[in-house]
């Protein structure tokens, strides 16, 4: 049963490779997310504190509230973020939290609008006066690992228009920061020695807490697993896998991706499968290459277990090779979305030679 296999022999093989070849480094691309000169921000990664005068929020909630609390269905619907309405009286206390959104307009002396006007520079105020409204992001302003967003309109009517237009941008900025955090957490330690990938047409920055799960050179499949040393239902099992095949012309489409992902589940994950009608299927650009994404739930009928997965399929024109970059999670005790975001960050370190 793949969820409970011991990986001791493979563990030694992998470490032997890395230690013999020598150099093991950290992947530092996400280090700039954290400003260590400031105290660490508090709160949950997914909690967003929103400051807005109630008269303004009534019209903005259908746009900004819906954008922030949008859901994605993996095994079950999960919110990206939890929206928490905050009182401006608590602004000082909450100024050390991770995700903050302040909303107001210039033609108002209400508490939140007044606070926003005093918080922003004269240049930004002037920009709002000229444009009618704008969105400003401040990272690590009060503490490290923080994003503070300011949405300001020229007047109440303009604020409503700007809020509707900027709602998805607010979500995108929050999601970008959330994803960057997952990258920072994932790469706190060293990565597997790059020389491990010398015999492959690609490389990945895999944290060295992962172990080799499957290495089928004939089948052009490579997979890694993260698992807690002791069985712990509060810690997810995480898988990152790469499949590749020669393809003289681009024939990668959703049908190809679905078929190949089903084959991978049957062959390498002891019969894992998914329902193509229930998973999310969409065009997706991976590492600047046009392709497709599957996102949803996998299941294993034999062992009565399941979890979440995401698969990215694309064709590399230079090498005439089709790729599937796949990640999955087994985590009955918790949400799958944060784990899949972390695995996406690691998968996104893929470099094709």
Image (cartoon, rainbow, N blue to C red):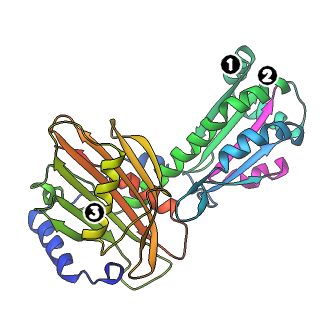
Report the Cα–Cα distance between label 1 and label 2: 10 Å
Q: Nearer the viewer, mark 2 or mark 3?
A: 3
Which numbered dot is residue 127?
A: 1
Q: Residue at x 33, y 57 (%)?
A: 326
- From this view, report whether residue 162 is shown above or below residue 295: above
Q: Nearer the viewer, mark 1 or mark 3?
A: 3
Badge 1: residue crowd in 10 Å (few <14, some 14–19, many ≥20): some
In the picture of the structure, the residue carrying the numbered disc 3 is 263
For label 2, the SS is: loop
Q: Residue at x 79, y 23 (%)?
A: 158
Report the Cα–Cα distance between label 1 and label 3: 55 Å
Residue 329 in sight from this viewpoint: yes
The disc, 1 or 3, on the residue closer to the chain's N-terminal end is 1
Relative to 109, 293 lies left or right = left
Q: Residue at x 25, y 53 (%)?
A: 204
In the picture of the structure, the residue carrying the numbered disc 2 is 154
For label 3, the SS is: helix
Q: Which residues are magenta?
A: 86-106
Q: Quadrant of the N terminus?
A: bottom left
Residue 210 in sight from this viewpoint: no
Asked if residue 320 is among those painted magenta in the image, a careful observer would answer no
């Amino acid at each position: 049963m793949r969820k409970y296999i011991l990986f001791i022999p493979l563990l030694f093989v992998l470490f032997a490779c890395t230690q013999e070849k020598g150099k093991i480094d950290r992947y530092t691309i996400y280090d700039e997310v954290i400003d260590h000169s400031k105290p660490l921000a508090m709160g949950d990664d997914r909690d967003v504190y929103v400051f807005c005068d109630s008269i303004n929020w009534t019209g903005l909630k259908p746009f900004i509230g819906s954008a922030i609390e949008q859901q994605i269905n993996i095994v079950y619907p999960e919110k990206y973020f939890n929206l928490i309405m905050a009182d401006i009286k608590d602004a000082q206390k909450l100024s050390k939290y991770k995700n903050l959104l302040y909303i107001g307009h210039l033609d108002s002396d209400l508490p939140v609008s007044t606070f926003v006007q005093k918080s922003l520079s004269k240049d930004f105020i002037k920009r709002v006066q000229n444009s009618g409204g704008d969105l400003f992001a401040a990272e690590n302003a009060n503490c490290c690992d923080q994003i503070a967003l300011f949405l300001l309109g020229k007047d109440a009517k303009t604020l409503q228009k700007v809020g509707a237009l900027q709602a998805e941008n607010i979500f995108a900025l929050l999601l970008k920061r959330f994803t960057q955090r997952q990258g920072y957490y994932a790469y706190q330690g060293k990565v597997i020695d790059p020389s491990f990938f010398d015999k492959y047409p690609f490389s990945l920055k895999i944290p060295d807490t992962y172990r080799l799960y499957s290495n089928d050179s004939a089948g052009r499949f490579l997979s890694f697993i993260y698992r807690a040393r002791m069985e712990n239902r509060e810690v997810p099992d995480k898988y990152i896998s790469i499949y590749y095949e020669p393809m003289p012309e681009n024939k990668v489409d959703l049908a190809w991706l679905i078929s190949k992902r089903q084959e991978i589940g049957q062959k390498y994950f002891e019969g894992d499968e998914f329902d193509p009608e229930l998973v999310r299927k969409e065009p997706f650009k991976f590492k600047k290459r046009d392709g497709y994404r599957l996102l949803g739930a996998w299941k294993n009928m034999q062992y009565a277990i399941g979890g979440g997965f995401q698969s990215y399929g694309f064709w590399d024109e230079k090498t005439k090779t089709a790729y599937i970059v796949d990640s999955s999670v087994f985590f009955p005790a918790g949400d799958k979305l944060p784990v899949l975001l972390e695995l996406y960050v690691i998968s996104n370190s893929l470099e094709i030679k």
